[in-house]
Image: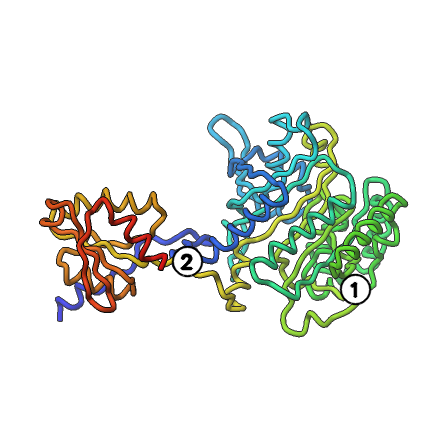
């Protein structure tokens, strides 16, 4: 009895930090699917990949994202270095890409400059399903064009990514949050509305009224959502330029036959946005039937973005218009699993290489590389000694052929080709086996 107890696995001493997790091999097929679709469409639409450090100077985020946002006030992982510099683990991807655009003089390149990224972000949030403190985003940034067609292109690209992954019945919500000319007046109107109802909203929104009024429209609290239903709408206070820009953007979407819902309370959670903002949802059953301007703020978006025409200048670069979008990989994968998406099956080996003895193993290593160069997928188990054990592995893998290379074959420079379903065998020269197997597999 004591012996049996000693075989029981011990409780682990160390665990992944709260809000983080290991992405295990059985989950990688989802990650590979999302990343491959993103890379393929990025290439087709002319976006080049960029990698930025996972930490940046804190000011890049405080200036860009904006004081009064939840990210700045509650969620950033910031620290001071031994040299006295204040750094922050990146909570989002756009500001670092803008910093790189400025630092490397990309404004001097032929415009537009189109960049994309895939990588980890960090926010201190209460861990829950689909929400982690280390999470992964992919994003697209489009610099140097102020034209509604670029907004439509980014939106079309976003929808195509999700559709290629397997989503349908997607819901696109869009709005304009104006510019520095028309937004200040709307903020005054909004503050006036909420001041009269200050006792009815949550404590966070009472602070937002003073610090960052637009954030009250982004609140997920039920009581705040009720107050929001009758709040002033920014589309009623847009200047002529912003009004026309939104109109032209929607016309492009109409021409592309892209359905959308005008959500007059959509503002996104970051301060750097101007004009167009949008989010894409995957509705629950029945949600896709909703019409008009009904709001879905209670759901997490799969992707979201918009214009940020002032951010390059705000981070001390030359004034440059820009538009972008980002998608949460964990959020997308969560829905993929929930909907039981059929994923493309990875290529399975049709050939198994069995080796016997030291000489057989040594020759097998070189032969395995020859098959790799010829793009023939071959399975093997160098750790299984006996031929019987290796043939069992080959049978479990359901390969068509097993190649057997023992001491005698290695000396004679031959190899045995065994057909697994019939057990028939054929001896060929080892330098001819790759060509022979390619011919058999082709048949």
**Residue 165: x and y, percent?**
56, 58
Q: Nearer the viewer, residue 112 or 3?
A: 112
Residue under numbered circle 1: 293
Is there CB contact under 8 Å for labels 2 and 1?
no
Residue under numbered circle 2: 346
- At 84% from the left and 51% from the top, the residue drawn is 247
Query: Which residue lies most toward the bottom here?
Result: 286
Q: Is residue 206 visible?
A: no
Q: Residues within 10 Å of mark 1 (few under 14, many from 20)?
A: some
**Residue 402: x and y, percent?**
23, 58
Q: Give the label, 2 or 1, closer to the camera.
A: 2
- What is the image's colouring? rainbow
Which label sits on residue 201? none
Q: Is residue 154 visible?
A: yes
- At 54% from the left and 36% from the top, the residue drawn is 52
Whether residue 159 sits left or right of residue 358 in the image: it is right
Callout count: 2
What distance separates the C-alpha of mark 2 from that of mark 1?
42 Å
Q: Residues within 10 Å of mark 2 (few under 14, many from 20)?
A: few
Q: Is residue 310 above or below residue 237?
A: above
Q: In what quadrant of the picture does the C terminus appear?
A: bottom left
Q: Is residue 318 above or below residue 15?
A: above
**Residue 71: x and y, percent?**
62, 47
**Residue 315: x and y, percent?**
67, 31
Q: Nearer the viewer, residue 430 or 193?
A: 430
- At 71% from the left and 59% from the top, the residue drawn is 172
Q: Nearer the viewer, residue 109 or 8?
A: 109
Whether residue 262 sits left or right of residue 96 in the image: it is right
Whether residue 323 sits left or right of residue 24 in the image: it is right
Mark 2 or mark 1, which has the lower sequence index?
A: 1
Q: Residue 311 occupies which quadrant of the picture?
A: top right
């Amino acid at each position: 009895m004591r012996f049996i107890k000693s075989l029981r696995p011990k409780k682990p001493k160390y665990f992944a930090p709260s809000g983080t997790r290991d992405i295990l091999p059985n989950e990688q097929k989802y990650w590979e699917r999302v990343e491959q679709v993103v890379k393929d469409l990025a290439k087709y639409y002319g976006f080049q990949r960029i990698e930025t450090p996972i930490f940046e100077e804190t000011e890049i985020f405080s200036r860009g994202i904006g004081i009064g946002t939840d990210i700045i006030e509650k969620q950033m992982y910031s620290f001071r270095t031994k040299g006295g510099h204040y750094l922050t683990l990146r909570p989002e991807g756009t500001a670092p890409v803008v910093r790189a655009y400025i630092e490397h003089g990309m404004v001097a390149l032929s415009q537009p400059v189109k960049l994309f990224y895939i990588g980890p972000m960090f926010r201190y949030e209460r861990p829950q399903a689909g929400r982690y403190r280390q999470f992964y985003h992919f994003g697209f940034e489009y610099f140097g064009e102020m034209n509604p067609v670029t907004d439509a292109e980014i939106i079309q690209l976003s929808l195509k990514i999700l559709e290629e992954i397997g989503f349908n019945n997607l819901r696109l919500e869009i709005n304009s949050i104006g510019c520095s000319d028309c937004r200040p007046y709307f903020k005054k109107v909004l503050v006036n509305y909420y001041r009269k109802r200050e006792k009815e909203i949550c404590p966070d929104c009472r602070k937002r009224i003073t610090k960052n009024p637009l954030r009250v429209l982004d609140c997920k609290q039920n009581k705040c959502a009720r107050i929001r239903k009758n709040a002033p709408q920014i589309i009623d206070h847009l200047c002529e330029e912003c009004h026309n820009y939104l109109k032209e953007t929607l016309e492009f979407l109409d021409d592309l036959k892209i359905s959308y819902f005008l959500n007059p309370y959509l503002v996104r959670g970051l301060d750097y946005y101007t004009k167009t903002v949008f989010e894409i949802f995957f509705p629950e059953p029945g949600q896709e039937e909703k019409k008009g301007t009904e709001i879905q703020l209670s759901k997490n978006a799969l992707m979201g973005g918009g214009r940020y025409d002032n951010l390059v200048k705000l981070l001390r670069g030359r004034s440059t218009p820009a538009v972008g979008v980002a998608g949460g990989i964990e959020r997308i994968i969560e829905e993929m699993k929930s909907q039981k998406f059929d994923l493309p099956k990875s290529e399975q080996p049709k050939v198994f290489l069995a080796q016997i003895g030291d000489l057989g193993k040594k020759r097998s290593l070189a032969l395995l590389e020859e098959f790799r160069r010829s793009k023939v997928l071959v399975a093997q188990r160098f750790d299984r000694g006996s031929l019987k054990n290796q043939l069992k592995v080959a049978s479990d893998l359901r390969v068509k052929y097993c190649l057997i290379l023992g001491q005698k074959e290695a000396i004679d420079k031959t190899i045995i080709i065994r057909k697994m379903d019939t057990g028939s065998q054929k001896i060929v020269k080892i330098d001819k086996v790759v060509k022979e197997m390619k011919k058999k597999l082709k048949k």
